[in-house]
Image (cartoon, helix red, strand yellow):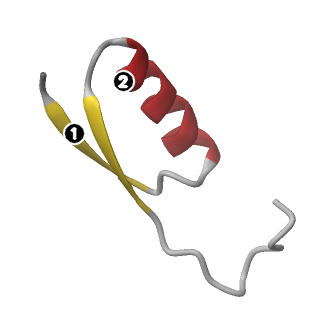
């Protein structure tokens, strides 16, 4: 299995990219900066 690092994994593009990679048998390591800028309910 191939490993991939996805930066911005909590965002819209990062999330959908991660889903596609997982569906294609990749090992995904997701990284994002969760800070006070965004509403925690998102």
Q: Quadrant of residue 31?
A: bottom left
| Residue 15 in picture, x, y percent from top left | 55, 40
Q: Residue at x 25, y 33 (%)?
A: 27
Q: Disc 2 on helix, strand or loop?
A: helix
Does residue 24 appear to the left or right of 14 in the view shown? Answer: left
| Residue 4 in picture, x, y percent from top left | 22, 39
The quadrant in which the N terminus is found is top left
Disc on res. 4: 1
| Residue 40 in picture, x, y percent from top left | 80, 72
Q: Residue at x 36, y 24 (%)?
A: 21
| Crowding at mark 2 (Cα within 10 Å: few <14, some 14-19, many 20+) | some
**From what the image shows, is residue 2 above or below residue 24?**
below
**From what the image shows, is residue 11 above or below residue 40?**
above
Disc on res. 26: none
Of the pair 1 and 16, the residue shown nearer to us = 1
Q: Disc 1 on helix, strand or loop?
A: strand
> Which residue has dot 2 on it?
21
- Give me the C-alpha separation between circle 2 and circle 1: 8 Å
Of the pair 31 and 1, the residue shown nearer to us = 1
| Residue 18 in picture, x, y percent from top left | 44, 34
Does residue 1 appear to the left or right of 4 in the view shown? Answer: left
Q: Quadrant of residue 12?
A: top right
Q: Residue furthest top?
A: 24
């Amino acid at each position: 299995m191939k490993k991939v690092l996805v930066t911005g994994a909590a965002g819209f593009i990062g999330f959908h990219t991660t889903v596609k990679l997982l569906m294609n048998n990749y090992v995904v390591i997701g990284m994002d900066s969760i800070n006070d800028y965004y509403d925690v309910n998102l």
